[in-house]
C-alpha cells in the first residue's frame, strides 16, 4: 500500500519528466508526436481544444481537479514546475535554508485577474489569456531563450568533437525568432524567477488565472490534506515547508484554493497530523466551519465570474471586422480564418520552434493588439512553407491550426502571390529569369511572352496556395518582385492532382 509520505516523491518524479519533456520539445531534441499529446494535458490548450470538439483532455483535467485539487499545478504545469526547479536550485546553493510562511490570500487581486481574463477572452481580446497562460508563457521561454541556448551548446560540442575528427555534432544556426517575443520571454522570467526565489508559488496563487480557477474547484475537491487537531502539536513546521503559504498552523486551517498539492508538508510532520483524506469526513467544529465558508466563497465567486462574463458576452462583441486581404498577415496552414485563429491560439510558439523552414515567426501588431505574439508566416531567402510539410498542424495542441490530410493541405490557399513587374529583372535588366515559376508547386506562377523574346511571370490566383516558394527564390533584393499577401479566409482550391505530381518531379526546391 502506498504510504502518503511518498506522495511528494511521486510528484517530484512526475515533475522532472514533464519539465524534461517540454524542454526537449521546445528545443527540438524531441519530435512532434509526443510533445503534441503532452500539450493536450495543459489546461488552457485543453480548454481551447474543447471548443473545437476535443473535450476528453479538458474533462480529464477537471475530473482530476475535483478529486484531488490542484495536482495539475505541481504535476503537469511546466511553468509551475519551473518555479519549483528554481527554488530547489536556490536551496542547494544557499547556506541558510529558506523557510516559507503563511501568506495573505490576496483574494481581490486573484479574482480580478481571473475575471478580467475570462471577460477579455469572451469578447475576443485574446492577448490577456495569451500572456497569462502558464503553458504559453513557458513555451515562449522555451522557443525564444532555451532553444537558442541549446543551439549554441550544440555548436560548442560540434567545435570540440570536430577538432578530434568526430562529426557526430554539426553546426546549426542560432536564431532569435523575434525581438518582441524575446523581450516578453525575458520579462516573464524576470517576474517568475524572483517570486519563486522569495515567495514560492506566489505567482501561481496571485497572478496565474489558471491557478485561481483550479483553486475554486479545489475548494470542493473530494480528497484533501486535512489536519488532525488531536495529533497536531502546533510545531509550525508544515507552514515553513508550504511554498504556497496556505497553511495556518496556529489555527489548523488550510486554504485549499491556494494548495498546489505538492505534498511537501506531509513527510515533515513528526506527529503525522497531516494526511490526504476524504474531504467530508467528520471533523471538529472549527474545521467544519472553515469548509462551509470555503464552499460558499467558491460558489459566490464562480457565480460572479459567470454572470460578469455572460453580461459582457451579451453586451459586447469585440471580434474586429477582417482587414482587407493586402493588409492581412499570412496565417499558418489550418488557421481557417482570423476569427478562429485569434480565438484559439495561445502563442505558445511550439509551431515556431518546430517549423523546419523557420518561416513561422511571432507577430507583433500584424493581427492588432488582440493577436500580439501569435504566429504568422514570413518568407525570406530559403524560407517558405514546404509543400509537403504539416508539422505546425500536427504540433498545435489547441486546435488553432486544424489538422488535415496532406492532400488537402496541398490545396489550401493561405495567401496569394502578387507580382510587381517594375522590380523584376526581366523588365529592369532585360534578362531571363523564371526562378519563381520553376519553383511554384502548383504552376500558379507561370511565364508569359513579354518583349524581345523574353518571358515574364504571371500569377493565376485560382492556383496559388501562398507557400512562398516564389518569394523566397526571387533574386531581387531588398524587395522581391513577387510577394505573398495574406487572405482573410483560407480555402481549398480546385487544383488537379496531375498538375501537382508533374511539378513535384520537375522541382528540386524541396517541394
Image: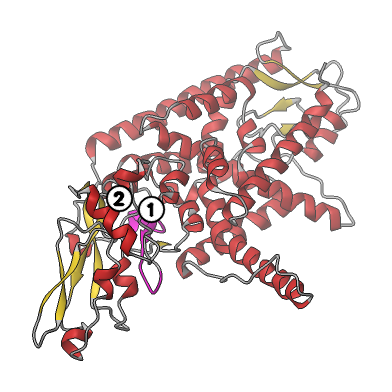
x, y percentage for residue 377? Answer: 35, 61
Please give the range of residues in magenta.
366-382
Q: Is residue 262 left or right of residue 345?
A: right
The answer to which quarter of the image holds residue 106 is: top right
Way the structure is coloured: secondary structure
Q: Is residue 26 above or below residue 287?
A: below
Q: Quadrant of the N terminus?
A: top right
Does residue 378 show up magenta in the picture? Answer: yes
Q: Nearer the viewer, residue 239 or 382?
A: 382
Residue 410 shows which numbered tag? 2
Q: Which residue is mark 1?
A: 388
Q: Nearer the viewer, residue 498 or 425?
A: 498
Magenta segment, principal secondary structure? loop
Q: Kindly identify the residue that appears in the image at 54 percent across and 52 percent down.
A: 139
Label 1 crowd (10 A; few <14 / some 14-19 / many >=20): few
Q: Is residue 34 above or below residue 179?
A: above
Q: Is residue 385 visible?
A: yes
Amino acid at each position: 500500500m502506498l504510504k502518503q509520505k511518498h506522495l511528494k516523491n511521486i510528484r517530484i518524479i512526475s515533475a522532472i519528466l514533464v519539465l524534461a519533456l517540454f524542454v526537449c520539445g521546445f528545443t527540438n531534441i524531441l519530435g512532434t508526436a509526443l510533445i503534441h499529446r503532452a500539450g493536450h494535458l495543459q489546461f488552457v490548450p485543453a480548454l481551447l481544444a474543447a471548443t473545437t470538439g476535443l473535450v476528453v483532455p479538458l474533462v480529464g483535467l477537471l475530473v482530476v481537479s475535483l478529486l484531488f485539487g490542484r495536482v495539475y499545478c505541481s504535476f503537469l504545469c511546466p511553468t509551475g514546475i519551473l518555479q519549483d526547479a528554481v527554488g530547489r536550485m536556490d536551496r542547494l546553493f544557499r547556506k541558510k535554508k529558506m523557510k516559507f510562511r503563511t501568506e495573505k490570500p490576496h483574494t481581490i487581486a486573484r479574482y480580478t485577474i481571473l475575471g478580467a481574463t475570462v471577460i477579455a477572452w469572451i469578447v475576443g481580446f485574446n492577448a490577456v489569456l495569451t500572456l497569462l497562460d502558464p503553458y504559453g508563457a513557458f513555451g515562449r521561454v522555451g522557443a525564444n531563450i532555451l532553444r537558442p541556448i541549446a543551439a549554441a551548446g550544440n555548436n560548442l560540442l560540434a567545435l570540440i568533437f570536430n577538432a578530434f575528427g568526430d562529426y557526430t555534432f554539426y553546426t546549426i544556426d542560432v536564431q532569435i525568432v523575434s525581438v518582441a517575443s524575446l523581450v516578453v520571454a525575458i520579462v516573464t522570467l524576470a517576474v517568475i524567477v524572483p517570486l519563486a526565489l522569495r515567495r514560492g508559488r506566489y505567482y501561481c496563487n496571485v497572478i496565474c488565472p489558471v491557478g485561481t480557477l483550479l483553486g475554486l474547484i479545489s475548494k470542493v475537491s473530494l480528497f484533501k490534506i486535512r489536519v488532525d487537531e488531536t495529533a497536531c502539536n502546533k510545531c509550525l513546521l508544515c507552514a515553513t515547508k508550504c511554498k504556497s503559504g496556505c497553511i495556518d498552523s496556529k489555527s489548523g486551517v488550510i486554504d485549499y484554493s491556494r494548495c498546489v498539492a505538492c505534498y511537501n508538508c506531509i513527510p515533515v510532520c513528526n506527529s503525522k497530523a497531516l494526511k490526504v483524506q476524504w474531504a467530508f469526513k467528520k471533523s471538529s467544529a472549527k474545521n467544519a466551519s472553515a469548509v462551509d465558508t470555503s464552499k460558499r466563497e467558491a460558489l459566490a465567486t464562480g457565480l460572479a465570474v459567470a454572470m460578469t462574463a455572460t453580461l459582457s458576452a451579451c453586451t459586447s462583441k469585440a471580434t474586429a471586422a477582417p482587414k482587407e486581404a493586402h493588409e492581412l498577415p499570412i496565417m499558418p496552414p489550418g488557421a481557417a480564418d482570423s476569427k478562429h485563429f485569434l480565438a484559439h491560439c495561445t502563442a505558445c510558439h511550439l509551431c515556431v520552434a518546430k517549423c523546419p523552414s523557420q518561416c513561422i515567426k511571432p507577430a507583433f501588431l500584424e493581427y492588432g493588439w488582440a493577436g500580439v505574439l501569435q504566429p504568422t508566416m514570413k518568407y525570406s531567402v530559403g524560407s517558405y512553407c514546404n509543400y509537403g510539410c504539416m508539422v505546425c498542424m500536427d504540433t498545435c495542441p489547441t486546435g488553432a491550426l486544424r489538422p488535415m490530410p496532406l492532400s488537402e493541405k496541398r490545396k489550401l490557399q493561405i495567401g496569394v502571390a502578387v507580382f510587381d513587374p517594375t522590380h523584376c529583372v526581366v523588365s529592369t535588366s532585360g534578362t531571363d529569369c523564371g526562378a519563381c515559376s520553376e519553383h511554384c508547386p502548383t504552376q500558379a506562377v507561370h511565364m508569359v511572352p513579354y518583349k524581345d523574346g523574353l518571358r515574364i511571370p504571371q500569377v493565376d490566383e485560382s492556383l496559388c496556395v501562398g507557400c512562398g516558394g516564389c518569394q523566397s527564390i526571387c533574386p531581387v533584393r531588398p524587395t522581391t518582385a513577387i510577394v505573398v499577401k495574406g487572405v482573410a479566409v483560407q480555402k481549398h482550391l480546385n487544383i488537379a492532382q496531375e498538375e501537382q505530381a508533374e511539378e513535384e518531379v520537375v522541382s528540386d526546391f524541396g517541394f
